[in-house]
Image: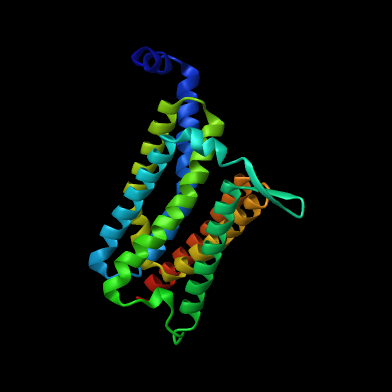
Amino acid sequence: MMDYIVSLALDPAAWIALAALITMEIVLGIDNLVFISILTNKLPLGQQKKARRIGISLALFLRLALLGALAFIVHLVEPILSVFGQSFSWRDLILIAGGLFLVWKATKEIHHAVDKKHEPDLFDAPKKHGLAAAIGQILLLDLVFSIDSIVTAVGMTPHLPIMVVAVIVAVLTMMLAAEPLSRFIRDNPTIVMLALGFLIMIGMTLIAEGFGAHVPKGYVYTAMAFSAGVEGLNILSRRSSKNRKV
């Protein structure tokens, strides 16, 4: 085992694969982090940091657990049923379910933001149940994003140590970015609507991939980056206007 690790450490191709996989894992983790930030910002201030730490820790635990069950993960991509000539694997069904949940959740949050007098529903549970409900929803999306992340990792390298290091680095990066991102979203309310729009787009992408339609991630993240850039200019413009008034 030690000889295997040493040989990997001395292999330039292994370092290139590690860098590429870390980058990919961090990019894939952005979706999860946006969802966690929006969800935890709805909790009482004293519970927000705790919920984010638990949510991201669960993501790390799930991904490492899935890496320990690679033989099982490989079988998740094998077809288990066919409907009207379209084959579905367990991974496809999980992506579709996760995408539907994201679209539903983001749509409900947009409705709540637009209509302040909405009727109580699942997401308006009493405060004492807020933390548990938030962690439950984070766990559900962690599972979806973790499976997608590990399947991507398996496709990029056959070396388990590289996958483990990449996953740990990516999740630790999420842990460091969680607080600044959540604070930025909380301080800029218009960002929330943009982020919810991102979640709808991500949800639709997951559904499409579940039905076998591959959507290049580059297109999705380029659109997100462009939209975020435009919103950033809007934020700077609003701040400039406030400074001139002062």
Q: Residue furthest right?
A: 85
Say which of 22 and 81 sits in front. 81
- Image color mode: rainbow
Occupied quadrant, residue 205? bottom right
Q: Quadrant of the N terminus?
A: top left
Where is 119 relative to 197, above or below? below
Q: Residue furthest front?
A: 81
| Image x and y of residue 121, in percent | 44, 79
Where is 71 relative to 87, above or below? above
Q: Residue furthest left?
A: 46
| Image x and y of residue 12, in percent | 47, 17
Say which of 22 and 223 sits in front. 22
Residue 156 visible, this angle:
yes
Say which of 193 and 56 sits in front. 56
Where is 115 relative to 241, above or below? below
Determine whether, in the image, residue 169 is placed left or right of residue 222: left
Determine whether, in the image, residue 89 is placed left or right of residue 239: right
| Image x and y of residue 240, in percent | 42, 68
How many labels, in total?
0
Residue 230 visible, this angle:
no
| Image x and y of residue 133, in percent | 35, 67
- At x 61%, y 59%, the residue is 204
- At x 44%, y 57%, the residue is 140
- At x 49%, y 45%, the residue is 147
Determine whether, in the image, residue 31 is placed left or right of residue 217: left
